[in-house]
Amino acid sequence: MACIKATDIKEYVMLVSITGIKKFILGLASKIKTYKEDLPTDDKTPMENENGSENGSNEVTECFEYVVFPQRVINITQRANGSLSHKKLQAWDIADIDGNVQPIYAPCTVKVLAKPTSNANSILYGSCDDQGNKEAKMTENGTLRVLTFNFTHDDDISDVEVGMIFKSGEKIGDEGKEGYATGNHSHVEVAEGWQYRKVTDDFGHYRIENITNIADIFHQLRGWNVIKRSNGYTFKEVDKRGNCL
Ligand SMILES: [Zn+2]
């Protein structure tokens, strides 16, 4: 005849209570899980594409400015790496509609970083936000980059001071003939990051530091820019100065 020993009862009670605790814990865990799943998910980035739009998951919803060609009429009179003064130099000469002096406009919001000592009146403008903080802009090849723009030959730059901020499309200067220039134009160079000085390179060019490929930078603004002479370059068109404007 089987009899239940006191130790068996103790073990049985322990087993029951352990199982009970386990069940309780598992129940609690599943309740927490359910609660968590019911919470609204706000950790999804705006990059995620939930609507299955044709732009796909690489759609960028961040606000940025486009870099826009700095004159109304696109007239590139000398290409980069040309045979004349641009031999082995990433620079354009731009001359707008004719031989008169025409304005240069801010390609994006910029701050005057420096007026390097030069006999040709160069000014360096860095891409920035409304407060003058360094800010990346959308370039023509689809990359957001912090840039410095150099414009040279303006006959009078006494009205431009370091620290001045110009909004995209505001007049920042003029073409001119200051320095070695045979006709009114502006010599344009673009550099990566903010640059404050010009240096003489191995080919004797007095140019901006960290210079970059100028063909990748400027957009054509629809209804504002008109092409007179693209000199073999092509421009991606945009219909506003920023994607959120
Ligand atoms: Zn030039």
Image (cartoon, rainbow, N blue to C red):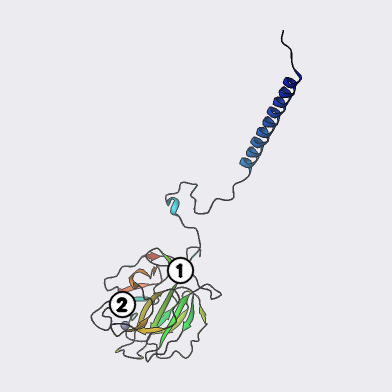
Query: Circle 1 — which element?
Result: strand
Cα gap from disc 2 to disc 1, whole angstroms: 22 Å
Name the residue: 43% across, 50% down. 56
Which label sits on residue 66? none
Count residues near mark 1 (Cα–Cα under 10 Å), then give few for <14, some for 14-19, many for 20+: many
Which label sits on residue 137? 1
Query: Circle 2 — which element?
Result: strand
Q: Viewed as shown, does residue 231 lie left or right of 17?
A: left
- Residue under label 2, please give it: 76
Query: Residue 186 placed where, x, y %?
Result: 36, 83
Mark 2: which amino acid?
Ile
Q: Viewed as shown, does residue 29 lie left or right of 46?
A: right
Quadrant of the image occupied by residue 90:
bottom left
Quadrant of the image occupied by residue 24:
top right
Which quadrant contains ligand 1?
bottom left
**Above or below, 13 relative to 235:** above
Name the residue: 57% across, 51% down. 43
Image quadrant where one finds the N terminus: top right
Front: mark 2 or 1: 1
Query: Residue 3 placed where, x, y %?
Result: 74, 12
Give the mark nearest the N terminus, 2 or 1: 2
The reply to whether the C-beta atoms of the residues labelled 2 and 1 are less than 8 Å apart is no
Mark 1: which amino acid?
Lys
For label 1, being within 8 Å of ligand 1 is answered no
